[in-house]
Amino acid sequence: MELEELKAGWSILNEQLAKSEMLNKRIIKEMITNRTQSAYERLFRFDLFGLILVLGICVMFPVLAATGKIVLKPLSFALLEGSIVIGFFMQLFFISLLLRFDMEKKKIYELTKLVLAYKLWMKRNTVIGSWIGMAALIAFLFIEKTQLVGNWEVRLAGVFILASVIMFFQTRFYLKNICAIEKGLAELKEFEEEPDQNRSV
């Protein structure tokens, strides 16, 4: 009788331990999911702000030129407006990628592919977009140098320094949050693989 009671006690204890382990895993999974979602939302807010900012500049620039608030040569205007439009479409593309990131509906491997695509295009944009912007700015300064007051070479150096600092912190922000998302997805993938490993054992 005592042996049966001992077995029953062990059985109850094992069930309680199993439930406790499942609860702990669920809590850890929710924490990882929330951390990953937070990193994604930071990226989305940042890109959305960038999209609104570029759109505002894209619209205001022609208005200021048309009203005579800024006077530019047609070529320099086309260069600046063209680079702004390119920046707008790049931001729109990044937003379209992030809008497809849905942790409730998509599987881990689908989310991982999206993050890799976003990371790849972010790196391309950092290189290509930056060179396009810098080339347009340099061309603008050369075209409008007769209208500029003071030493325009010094201004150009100042713009380069400012742009480099902005790019450094922007890239650091992107990589930090992308790494957080990648780490979270890798940890969530381990949770998905655990049942298969247990069945194989």
Image (tube, rainbow, N blue to C red):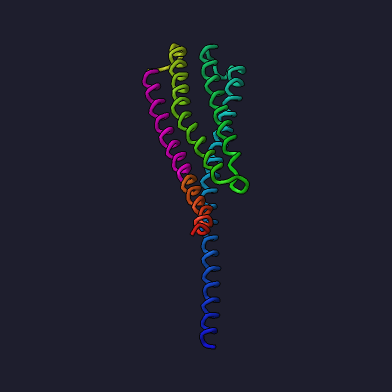
Give the residue drawn at x 56%, y 40%: 44
In percent of width and height, residue 114 lies at 54, 38
In percent of width and height, residue 147 lies at 46, 13
In percent of width and height, residue 132 lies at 47, 21
State whether residue 24 is above or below residue 11: above
State whether residue 94 is above or below residue 109: above
Quadrant of the image containing the N terminus:
bottom right
Quadrant of residue 63 in the image? top right
Task: Verify whether residue 131 appears in magenta.
Answer: no
Give the residue drawn at x 56%, y 23%: 85
In percent of width and height, residue 182 lies at 48, 44
Task: Verify whether residue 164 appears in magenta.
Answer: yes
Residue 78 located left or right of residue 131:
right
Give the residue drawn at x 50%, y 47%: 185
- Nearest the camera: 86 or 9? 9
Q: Main secondary structure of the magenta part?
A: helix
- Nearest the camera: 12 or 46? 12
Give the residues drawn in magenta, as a range. Answer: 152-179
Q: Residue furthest front?
A: 200
- Nearest the camera: 74 or 91? 91
Give the residue drawn at x 51%, y 71%: 17
State whether residue 33 is above or below residue 11: above
- Please give the count of numbered marks on the rendered protein: 0
State whether residue 101 is above or below residue 73: below
